[in-house]
Every structure is written in C-alpha cells, then in structure tokens.
Image (cartoon, helix red, strand yellow):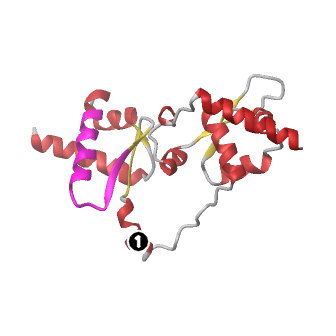
C-alpha cells in the first residue's frame, strides 16, 4: 500500500507540475482514479510533507483547486536566475475597485460605477490586465453586460483560499465609511 500511495502522490505531483496552474480537485481525483474525499486526504498529506521537508516548493489550495508553487523564502534565490517579474502597482483606485468586485461578485461595470460614483473602465481593465479580475459571465438583462469576478491570481496575491475567507466588514465600520463618504460629498 505504501508503494501504491507513493505512486499516487507522484502522479499528482506530475499533474500539478505539468499543468503549472491550479487544477480542480475533481479533475485530480478523476486522473488518479480515486474518489474526491480520498484524493483530498492524499493532497493534505502531500501539503504537510511539503511544509515539513526542506523543499523549495509547496502545495497550496485555492478555492477547491491545487497548485505547486515556489516557497516565498526562496524568492531572492530564484530572482537571481529569472528576470525580476513586473511588479503591478495597485493604486487606491484599483484597490477600491478590486474590493468592490471581490465583495460583490459577480458584478457589472455599471454596478461598480454606481458604488464608486465615477467611471471605472480604466480600473477594471487594469485589474483584468493584472489577472486579478476576469469575465465570469453575462447578466441576463438588456445589452447582456459583462459580469466580473476575482481570479485564482487574486486569491494567491492576497493569501486567501477562497472569497469566503475575505475579512468581514463590521456593520459599525460600514456606517463609519458611509459617514466619511457623506462628509466628502458635502465638501464637493
């Protein structure tokens, strides 16, 4: 059985390495010919092994999908070989727009603009370019506007496994934000 488990883990590792991106739990289970729960337990064992051993990679879960990635502590070593990746700068406008999308997804540009009070084409386009936001469908309404939602890259970048893990905003904070917005409107 131990040899069989090692072969299964090696198969999963090969899949994740070859794909290089997130792979859904169900697809991994299908590929290794095990049920979803058994596959999830095997992946948990693998995650623990990667965490405990002195290895340069780790196995992460992102919203029901799994991916191999480099451990953060080896970034300085890795960067000596690979050209420095372009660091996308998230301005206050982009962060505000991203927060609206993250908490209200799926959402249209018109709905984003209603919350922000200004046009949001540039902000949404930049977030799509940075691969933090993507088209997730179309609204069943006149003109069939595009619905936007966050991506796996968003989850990776902000260190959450799913949108359910986003911090909750306390109702008192929401009221405080409303008061600040009203004060700003009075100054305009």
The answer to whether residue 149 is above or below residue 126 is above
Q: Is 185 on the left-hand or right-hand side of 85?
A: right
Q: Classify mark 1: residues with Cα within 10 Å, few (<14), some (14-19) or many (20+).
A: few
Residue 16's x, y, as percent? 36, 49
Looking at the rendering, which quadrant does residue 57 occupy? bottom left
The answer to whether residue 69 is above or below residue 110 is below
- What residue is at 17 percent from the left and 41 percent from the top? 5
Q: Toward the viewer: 42 or 85? A: 85
- What residue is at 51 percent from the left and 36 percent from the top? 167
Residue 49's x, y, as percent? 22, 49
Count of numbered tags:
1
Residue 82's x, y, as percent? 46, 73
Q: Toward the viewer: 71 or 12? A: 71
The answer to whether residue 22 is above or below residue 164 is below
Q: Residue furthest bottom?
A: 80
Q: Is 167 on the left-hand or right-hand side of 176?
A: left
- What residue is at 83 percent from the left and 29 percent from the top? 143
Question: Which quarter of the rendering shows the C terminus?
Answer: top right
Question: Which quarter of the rendering shows the N terminus?
Answer: top left
- What residue is at 69 percent from the left and 50 percent from the top? 94
Looking at the rendering, which quadrant does residue 34 occupy? top left
Q: Is residue 126 magenta?
A: no
Which stretch did the figure color magenta? 40-60
Looking at the rendering, which quadrant does residue 22 occupy? top left
Label 1 sits on residue: 76
Q: Is 36 on the left-hand or right-hand side of 2?
A: right
Q: Toward the viewer: 169 or 63? A: 169
Q: Is residue 44 magenta?
A: yes
The local secondary structure at tag 1 comes to helix
One can see residue 170 in this view: yes
């Amino acid at each position: 059985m131990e040899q069989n488990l090692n072969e299964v883990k090696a198969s999963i590792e090969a899949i994740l390495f070859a794909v290089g991106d997130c792979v859904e739990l169900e697809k991994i289970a299908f590929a290794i010919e095990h049920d979803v729960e058994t596959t999830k337990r095997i992946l948990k064992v693998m995650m623990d092994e990667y965490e405990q051993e002195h290895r340069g990679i780790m196995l992460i879960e992102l919203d029901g999908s799994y991916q191999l990635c480099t451990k953060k502590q080896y970034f300085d070593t890795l960067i000596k070989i690979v050209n420095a990746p372009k660091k996308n700068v998230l301005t206050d406008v982009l962060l505000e727009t991203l927060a609206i999308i993250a908490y209200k997804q799926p959402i249209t540009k018109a709905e984003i603009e209603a919350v922000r009070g200004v046009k949001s084409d540039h902000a949404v386009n930049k977030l799509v370019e940075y691969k933090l936001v993507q088209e997730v469908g179309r609204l069943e309404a006149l003109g069939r506007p595009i619905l936007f939602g966050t991506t796996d890259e968003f989850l990776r970048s902000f260190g959450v496994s799913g949108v359910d893990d986003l911090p909750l905003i306390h109702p008192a904070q929401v009221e405080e934000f409303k008061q600040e917005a009203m004060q700003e409107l009075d100054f305009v």
